[in-house]
Image (cartoon, grey):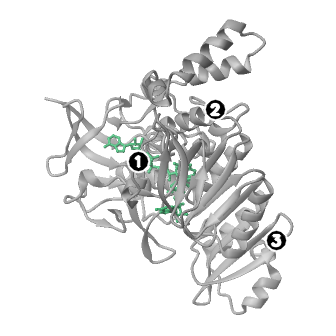
Amino acid sequence: MGRAYVYVILGGGVAAGYAALEFSRRGVGHGELCIISEESSVSLFTPITIYYLVERLGSLACGCMRRVIPTYLASTTLRKSRNTTTENPVVPYERPALSKGFLLPEAPTRLPSFHTCVGANEERLTPKWYNEHGIELVLGTRVKSVDVRRKTLLTSLGETISYKYLIIATGARALKLEEFGVSGPDAENVCYLRNVADATRLVEVMQSCPGGNAVIIGGGYIGMECAASMVINKMNVTMVFPEAHCMARLFTRKIANYYEDYYKSKGVKFIKGTVLSSFEKDSDEKVTSVVLRDGTKLLTDMVVVGIGIRPNTSLIEGQLTLEKGGIKVNGLMQSSNSSVYAVGDVATFPVKLFGETRRLEHVDSARKSAKHAVASLMAPNKTWDFDYLPFFYSRVFTLSWQFYGDNVGEVVHYGDFLGSTFGAYWVKNGYLVGSFLEGGTKEEYEAIAKATRLKPRIEDLAELERQGLGFAVSI
Ligand code: FDA
Ligand code: NAD
C-alpha cells in the first residue's frame, strides 16, 4: 500500500515550483498534488566556515580560538570536514542564484530568500506555503523507478506512490570529467555546480584558499558566471576550454572578444583550444595542478568544472519517446503517454516560431513550460499549444545581456563594441530569427523580444546594420 495523488511532480527544482504556484492558482484540492524531490542543501557550519567566521569576527574571537581552529583545520582535510555537514531537504528554489548572488563575498544570497517564484517577481513558496496550500512534499527522497503503465513511482525508501497524472521535472545533471576519460576528479577541491549543496561546497573550498589560484574547466555559462563571481572573491582565475572563444554555443567571435577583453581587464587568464588531460594531487588527495593536453601544468588551489549537462531521463527510458536528449512532448507538454507530462530542462517541445522541436536549458523556459503543463492539465479545453519565444540571459560583473530566438543564419552586429551597448541580429532565409543585446534598458530588451517574435522580413542586411537597435525599437 502506498500513497495516491491526482497529480505528482517528479523533481523539485525551478519547474516544480512554478508548476505548484500554477496548480494553486487554478484551485488544486488539498491532498491532490505531491512533489517528490531528492534535493538537499548542506549546513554551512563546517569547521572551515566556523574558521572563516572566526577570522571575520576577529576582534570578537579570543586568541586561543584563533590558534586552535587553524590547528584543527590543518589536521582535517576538506573530505573530513564535509562529513560534519548535515543535509537539509529543500523546497524548490531559483537555481540561477547559485552562480551569482550565492557566491558573492559580501551579503551573499541564501535560502530561504530565493525560493521559487521570486525570480519572476511572484510569491516566495516556503515550506509553510506548501503546507497551507495542501501540497504534499516528499523531500530528500530519490525516485528509483517509474512504471508508466501502472502509473506508479518507487522511492528510495521503498514507498510506492501512485498518480493519475505525472509531471516529470527532473532537470539535468552536470557532466563529469570521468565521462571524458579524465580520472581522479573526485578530489575535495574539484567543484561542480548544479545544486545548492554544490554551491555551498564551492563557497567552502573558495574560502579555504583565500586569494588562491582557481582553474575553471569549460567556457560556457557556468564557467563565465563562476569566473566573475570568483574574481569578485579575489581569486586568481584561469579559464580553460576547447573552443576558440568563450560561450561558443551563443556568442559570435565579436561578442566573445568583448567579454574576454573585459574578463582579462579583471585579471582572468584564458587558455583556449585545449582541454585538460589529468590532475596532480598531494598526499591529502587535493588537486595541486591541472595538466593540459599540450603538457602545460597550471598550479591551482581549486578547480571548478562546468562542461555541460545531461537531462535526467533514465527513469523513463524505454517507456516514453525521447528526442534530442529529452522527453518528447507535444504543445501541451504531454509525452508519448497521455498521463505523463514533461517540463523544464528535461523536455523537448515544439517551438512554433522555429517549426521544430528544441530542448532548452534555461530558467524562463522551465518556468513557462511548467505553467503551461498545469494549464493543459487543469483547463484542457482552454489551453492551446505552447507558443514560446526562447529567452536566455546572463549577468556578470556589471555586464548584462539578453537573447531572444535562435542564433542561426547570417549575423549582423550593431552598436558600440568599445562602449557598453551593442548587439547582434541573426537573419535566416531573409527573416529576423534572433536578437542579442548587451547593456540594454528594459524597454530596449522588450523591443528586441517583440521584433524577434514578429520575425520580420529583412531585405537588406546593410540597412539592418545601419539601423541597429533602432530597427527593433521602431517596430
Ligand atoms: P532543475 O534542475 O531546476 O530541477 C530538477 C529537480 O529534480 C532537482 O531538484 C533534482 O534534485 C530533482 N530530481 C532529479 N532526479 C530526481 C529523482 N530521480 N528523484 C527525485 N528528484 C529528482 N538559466 C537561465 O536562463 N539564466 C541563468 O542565469 C541561469 N543560471 C544558472 C545557474 C546555475 C548554477 C545552474 C545550475 C543553472 C542555471 N540556469 C540558468 C539554468 C536553469 O537553472 C535551469 O534551466 C532550470 O533550473 C531547469 O529547471 P528544471 O526544474 O527543469 O530542473
Ligand atoms: P555549457 O554547455 O554552457 O558550456 C560547457 C562548456 O564546457 C563549453 O565551453 C564546452 O566546450 C566545455 N567543454 C565541454 N566538454 C569539455 C571537456 N571535456 N573539457 C573541457 N571543456 C569542455 O554548460 P555549463 O556551462 O556547464 O552550464 C550547465 C548548464 O547550466 C547549462 O544548461 C546552462 O544553460 C545552465 N546555466 C545557464 C546559465 C544562464 O542561462 N545564464 C547560467 C549558468 C548555467
Q: In which quadrant will I find the C terminus?
A: bottom right
Q: Residue at x 70, y 43 (%)?
A: 235
Across and down, in percent, residue 456 comes to 65, 82
- Dot label at residue 184: 1
Q: Nearer the viewer, mark 2 or mark 1?
A: 1
Residue 66 falls in image quadrant = top right
Residue 457 falls in image quadrant = bottom right
Q: In which quadrant will I find the N terminus?
A: top left
- Dot label at residue 20: none
Dot 3 crowding, Cα within 10 Å, few <14, some 14–19, many 20+: some
Residue located beneath label 2 in the image: 207
**Total residue callouts:** 3
Q: Residue at x 67, y 7 (%)?
A: 64
Task: Judge by depth and name the residue closer to the eye, 468 or 20.
Answer: 468
Compare marks 2 and 1 and give the one earlier in the sequence. 1
Any part of residue 45 in sight: no
